Image (cartoon, helix red, strand yellow):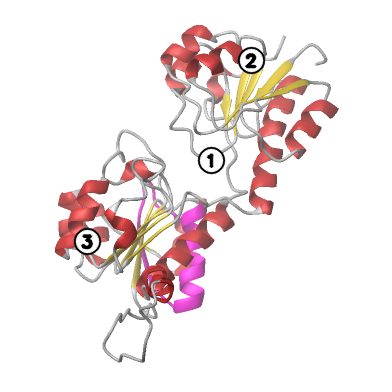
C-alpha cells in the first residue's frame, strides 16, 4: 500500500488523514480556501491513485475521461449527485459514500426547522434585533401547534426513519410516507402508513423531504405540487436543493398555496443574501448544516477513509455505490 497516494479535496476532520497514513497510504490535502476548479482537480488527481472527494467536486464524464486511472473514490457525504456514477462505472472505478453516521444530525435539523417554521421563530428573533418588540400583542405572529398533526415523509430511508421517530415521540404526529419501496420497519415502529405521492402532498400538514437527488426527483416539488398541498402546510427540505424549484416555492408562499417552509438546502447554493425567502415570516433557512456536528463529521471522515483502506487491503468497499465494478486492487 505504501506506493498508493490519496488526494483529500478539502480540509476535513484529521481522523481521515491519520487512518489513511497509518494504513500506509500517502496523503495529499488541498489547502485552498474553497473547492478547486475542475481543471485544478483534474491536475491534482492525475498525481494520485485515490480520491477522497466532497460534494462540491464536479466528477462528470469529462473528469473521468481525464482521470480513468483512479482506483477508487471515497465520497465525504451520503449524497453523490455530483458524481456521474455511470461514467465512473465505465471507467471501472468504485465509488463509495458515508451513510448512516449523519442520520441523527440531519434529522435533528429537519425537526428543528419544523418547529422554527411552525412558530415563526427566525422571523420573531429578527423583530427583537430590529427593535420592533414593544409589547404583548395577542393576535400578532401566531404559529400553530404540531401535536397530532400529520407528518408526510418523502423518502423513508435512514434519515426519514429518525425524523419519524422524533415526531412520533415528541408530538404524537400521524406518520404517512411515500418511498420507492414499502418500509415495513417504519410501519411497525411508528405506525407509518404508505401512501401514493398524490396522497402524500394532499394530506401532509408537514411534508419533509429526505430523498436523493436523481432524474426522478430533480425539481419534483414545483408549482403544480405546491398548489395541491394544504394552504396550512409546511414544506421542509434537508436533502438536496435541486429537489425543489425555488422560484415556485417563493410563489407558493407568497400566494398562500402553502403556509411555510424550512430549508437546510437551497437551489442554487449558496443562497444570495437578497433572496426573498429570508424575509418571509413563515420561513426558516439554514446554510446546509445538516451534518454539522462533531460526531457526524468525524463519523463521515472515518467511513470515507475506511472505504479506501478496505479497498486497498482486500478489494472490498463497505459502502460501495456501484459494487459491480469491484475488483482486487493491484
State whether residue 149 is above or below residue 24: below
Query: Was residue 154 drawn as part of the magenta stretch in this picture?
Result: no
* Nearest-to-viewer mark from 3 and 1: 3
Residue situated in front as seen by the camera: 38 or 185:
38
Residue denoted by label 2: 71
Residue 169: percent from the left, percent from the top?
Answer: 51, 75
- Marks 1 and 2 sit apart, C-alpha to C-alpha, by 20 Å
The part of the image, by quadrant, that contains residue 15 is top right
Residue that appears at 39% across and 77% down? 131
The magenta segment: 159-183
- Counting residues from the start of the chain, the first of labels 3 and 1 encountered is 1
Contact, CB < 8 Å: mark 1 with mark 2? no
Residue 299: percent from the left, percent from the top?
Answer: 68, 46
Residue 9, numbered label: none
Residue denoted by label 1: 78
- Counting residues from the start of the chain, the first of labels 1 and 2 encountered is 2
Residue 322: percent from the left, percent from the top?
Answer: 52, 25
Residue denoted by label 3: 253
Residue at the farthest front position? 131
- Marks 3 and 1 sit apart, C-alpha to C-alpha, by 30 Å
- Marks 2 and 3 sit apart, C-alpha to C-alpha, by 47 Å
Residue that appears at 19% across and 68% down? 231
Q: Residues within 10 Å of mark 1 (few under 14, many from 20)?
A: many
Amino acid at each position: 500500500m505504501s506506493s498508493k497516494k490519496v488526494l483529500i479535496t478539502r480540509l476535513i476532520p484529521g481522523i481521515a488523514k491519520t487512518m489513511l497514513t497509518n494504513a500506509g497510504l500517502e496523503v495529499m490535502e488541498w489547502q485552498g480556501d474553497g473547492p478547486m476548479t475542475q481543471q485544478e482537480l483534474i491536475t491534482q488527481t492525475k498525481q494520485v491513485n485515490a480520491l477522497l472527494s466532497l460534494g462540491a467536486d464536479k466528477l462528470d464524464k469529462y473528469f473521468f475521461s481525464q482521470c480513468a486511472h483512479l482506483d477508487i473514490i471515497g465520497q465525504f457525504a451520503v449524497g453523490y449527485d455530483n458524481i456521474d456514477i455511470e461514467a465512473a462505472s465505465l471507467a471501472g472505478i468504485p465509488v463509495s459514500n458515508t451513510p448512516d453516521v449523519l442520520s441523527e444530525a440531519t434529522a435533528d435539523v429537519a425537526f428543528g426547522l419544523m418547529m422554527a417554521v411552525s412558530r415563526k421563530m427566525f422571523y420573531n428573533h429578527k423583530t427583537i434585533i430590529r427593535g420592533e418588540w414593544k409589547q404583548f400583542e395577542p393576535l400578532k405572529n401566531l404559529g400553530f401547534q404540531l401535536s397530532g398533526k400529520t407528518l408526510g415523509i418523502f423518502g423513508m430511508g435512514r434519515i426519514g426513519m429518525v425524523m419519524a421517530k422524533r415526531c412520533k415521540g415528541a408530538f404524537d404526529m400521524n406518520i404517512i410516507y411515500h418511498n420507492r419501496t414499502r418500509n415495513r420497519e417504519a410501519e411497525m415502529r411508528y405506525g407509518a402508513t404508505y401512501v401514493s405521492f398524490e396522497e402524500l402532498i394532499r394530506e401532509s400538514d408537514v411534508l419533509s423531504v429526505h430523498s436523493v437527488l436523481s432524474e426522478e426527483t430533480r425539481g419534483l416539488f414545483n408549482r403544480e405540487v405546491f398548489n395541491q398541498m394544504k394552504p396550512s402546510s409546511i414544506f421542509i427540505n434537508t436533502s438536496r436543493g435541486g429537489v425543489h424549484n425555488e422560484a415556485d416555492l417563493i410563489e407558493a408562499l407568497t400566494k398562500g398555496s402553502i403556509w411555510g417552509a424550512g430549508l437546510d438546502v437551497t437551489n442554487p447554493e449558496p443562497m444570495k443574501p437578497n433572496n426573498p425567502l429570508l424575509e418571509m415570516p413563515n420561513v426558516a433557512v439554514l446554510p446546509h448544516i445538516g451534518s454539522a456536528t462533531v460526531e457526524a463529521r468525524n463519523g463521515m471522515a472515518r467511513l470515507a477513509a475506511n472505504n479506501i483502506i478496505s479497498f486497498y487491503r482486500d478489494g472490498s468497499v463497505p459502502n460501495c455505490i456501484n459494487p459491480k465494478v469491484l475488483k482486487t486492487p493491484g
